Image (cartoon, rainbow, N blue to C red):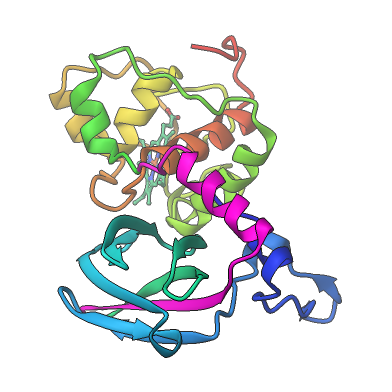
Amino acid sequence: MRTPLCSLMALCAMTTMAIGATGSEVEEKYLIPVPSEQKKIKLGETKTFQDGNLTITVTAIERTGIEMEAEGVAMPLPSSVETLVEGANGTICTTVYLGKVGARAIVSAACEAESDDLRAALVAQQSAAPVEVVDPVDLIAEVEQGGLENPYLGDVSAIAEGQELFLANSCNGCHGGTGGGGMGPPLSNGVWVYGIDDDTLFRLVTLGSDGLIEAGYSRVAREKVVGPMPPYEGIIESADDLWKILAWVRSISQSDAPPLK
Ligand code: HEC
C-alpha cells in the first residue's frame, strides 16, 4: 500500500527533477520521500528519532522489508513504502525503510503534530490488508500442478511493470529486450516449448527447464534455440513480480492460443 502522504505532509522531494535532455518529469512512483531523519539500525537495536518522539526497534531485516517495534507496537515496514505510526507527544510519524547497508537497515522518519488528515490516513492504513510477499517457491509447493493462474493477464499497469521487471532480472540477456529472442528462444513467437498456460510458465521460470522436467512436465515443442532455462528460484522472490513479468510475456506473444489458460 502506498499512502498519498506526500501531498499531506510535504515530506517528499517533489522537486520535479528532469531526466536527461528530454526534460520529462519523473513519474510519481519513482519519487522516494526524503524524510527529515535517517538512521542505520542493527538487528535488535533501538533508536530514537525526532527528538525522542519516536522509538524504533528493528526485530527482522530482509531485503523486501523489516519488522519493527515502534513505540512498543510490532509491525512490518515494507521497503520503500511510507508507513504511519503513532509517535509520542501527540505526533504521527511517517516511517520508510530505505534498504540495507551491510547488516543494518536504513530507516527514516519524520513526525508531525496530529491532524485530522493524518489520523484518517493512519486509520485507513491500519484497516488495509497487510502487504504479503509470497515466494514463488512456496506458491509452487502449495498449489497442485496445473492450478496456478496469473491474476494480471491484460492488466495494463501490471504489464508495464512486468516489462521493467523482465529487464531488471536480466531476462533480456537471453530473450532480448523485446522478447524477440537471442541466446534464448523468442517469447514473442507462437511456439511454447512446454506450453503457454500460466501454471507451466510460472513453474518453468522458477524451477528452470531441468527442475520443470523433474517435476514431471514435458517438452511439447521445439524452438530454433535449444538450451536450458535457468531456475530463478531465490532470485525472483515475489510471486507477484513473476506474475507481472509473465503477464508482459503473454502480452507480446503472437500465439494463436486463447488468451486465458
Ligand atoms: C541464461 C539464459 C536465459 C535467461 C537469463 C532467461 N532465460 Fe528464459 N529461457 C532460456 C532458454 C534456453 C529457454 C528454452 C528452455 C528449454 O528449451 O528447455 C527459455 C525458455 C523460457 C520461456 C519459455 C519460452 C518458450 O518458447 O516456450 C519463458 C516464458 C522464459 N524463458 C522466460 C524467462 C524469463 C521471464 C526470464 C527472466 C526472469 C528468463 N526467461 C531468463 C534462457 C534464458
Is residue 246 on the magenta stretch?
A: no
Magenta-tinted stretch: 103-132
Give residue 94's position: percent from left, percent from top.
51, 68
Q: Name the residue rendered at 84%, 81% in the picture.
A: 21
Q: Compared to 216, does 242 lie above or below?
A: below
Q: Compared to 235, does 108 lie above or below?
A: below
Look at the image and tell me whether residue 19 can be seen.
Answer: no
When asked about the image quadrant of residue 213, the answer is top left
Look at the image and tell me whether residue 28 can be seen.
Answer: yes
Q: Count how many numbered circles sit on residues in the image.
A: 0
Give residue 73's position: percent from left, percent from top.
29, 59
Q: Quadrant of ligand 1?
A: top left
Is residue 112 on the magenta stretch?
A: yes
Give residue 219's position: percent from left, percent from top.
29, 19
Q: Name the residue rendered at 64%, 24% in the picture.
A: 254
Give residue 186's position: percent from left, percent from top.
52, 37
Q: Is residue 99 left or right of residue 83?
A: left
Q: Is residue 83 left or right of residue 70?
A: right
Q: Name the residue rendered at 34%, 49% in the picture.
A: 236
When asked about the image quadrant of residue 58, the answer is bottom left
Furthest-bottom residue in view? 51
